[in-house]
Amino acid sequence: MDRKLKASARAYAIQGLVKYHGLRNEKLRLPFHDSISVCMKALPTITTVAFNREFAEDQIRINGKSPSRKEQDRVLAVVNHLRHLSGLGSLKARIESRNPDVKGKGLGFSASGFAALGLAAARALELDIETPVLSEVVRLGAGSASRSLAGAFSIWYANRNGRSYAEELASASSIKMRTVIVPIESEIKTDRAHADAVKSPFFKPRLAYLQGILPRMKRAISRKDVESIGRLAEEDTLNLHAVTMTGKEGLVLFSPLSIEIIREVRRLRTEEKLPVWFSLDTGPSVFVNTTREAAQSVRRNLSKITDNILVSDPGGPAEIIDKHLF
């Protein structure tokens, strides 16, 4: 085997716009309902994967560290599936993955990590695999990775003709939205919140509510309507966290800083008349969605509360890159 089985990919972390919560099949990471997200260009993950007969065992490093056993099992769920498809199942892999130096929970890095992993591994194994099919593979590592792979404004179907995959709804450059991101750290594991969601008395009402907000968000995206996208993402945030807080564990993912940012966003909208809306996934970090024109004003006001701020445009689909990590 003389050819070089090595590739690198970049994928972008996601912000849930209509967020998913709970899994009807944890092993296959099948959700209860469709979900929609947008990639964040300021939050890229880069992953390099190499396969070689001389490797004695799989080697995995994430941000310079060896992953936990559970994290390793999730990585291998994706890699083993692709090795099987390639017919090169005996080859061991070396995997290096790095996120930007941004510390915060609920920023969607598991999505970008597994999207970059799947694309790099598929290319290294010389697999000719279409994005919807590959999105079903990366989903085995993290459900939202399916949307990070598709990129930009994307939808992940819970069950479409017996399949659960993602596809792009609109390109990154087609919608003039900008997001001010406030990363906030937390020790709560996202999987814990997903497992507890189904125990909330509000979970079934959320499933019914989603039948209305999903087509409304799709319509807002098709119309490139930043105001409606932001408003609906904020509405869905509150609905999602009502479920999270009322599971058996009563998980409150907001931090005091989250609340302070939310209050300031509402003040900017009502008093300053700025087009601005908050959005939180399953964590305390806050995405503040606005227009390109208003972004600097929003950032300036939020910087009075914290200097830990990023500004991001929408990011595109996962892509192969030439620069390797090793």
Image (spheres, grey):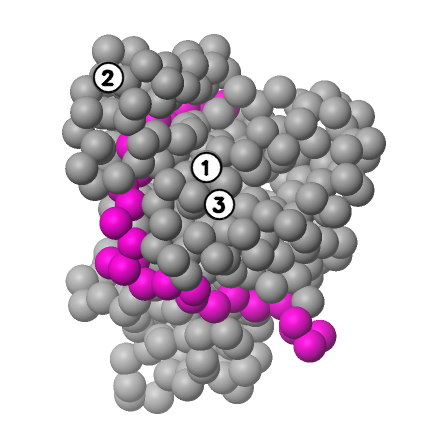
Q: Residue at x 34, y 30 (%)?
A: 276
Q: Which residue is mark 1?
A: 231
Q: Residue at x 50, y 57 (%)?
A: 218
Question: Picture coordinates of residue 285 (x, y %)?
Answer: 43, 28
Q: Considering only vertical position in the picture, is 57 above or below 12?
A: below
Q: Residue at x 48, y 25 (%)?
A: 284
Q: Which amino acid is tagged 1? A: Arg
Q: Nearer the viewer, mark 2 or mark 1?
A: 1
**CA distance for labels 2 and 3:** 23 Å
N-terminal-most mark, 2 or 3: 3
Give the extent of the magenta segment: 160-186
Q: Which amino acid is tagged 2? A: Asn
Mark 2 and mark 1 residues within 8 Å of each other at the beta carbon: no
Q: Considering only vertical position in the picture, is 2 above or below 112?
A: below
Q: Is residue 264 left or right of residue 213?
A: left
Q: Which residue is mark 3?
A: 17
Question: Picture coordinates of residue 101 (x, y %)?
Answer: 28, 35
Quadrant in which the C terminus appears: bottom left
For label 2, count other residues whose C-alpha is less than 10 Å away and answer few (under 14), some (14-19) or many (20+).
Answer: few
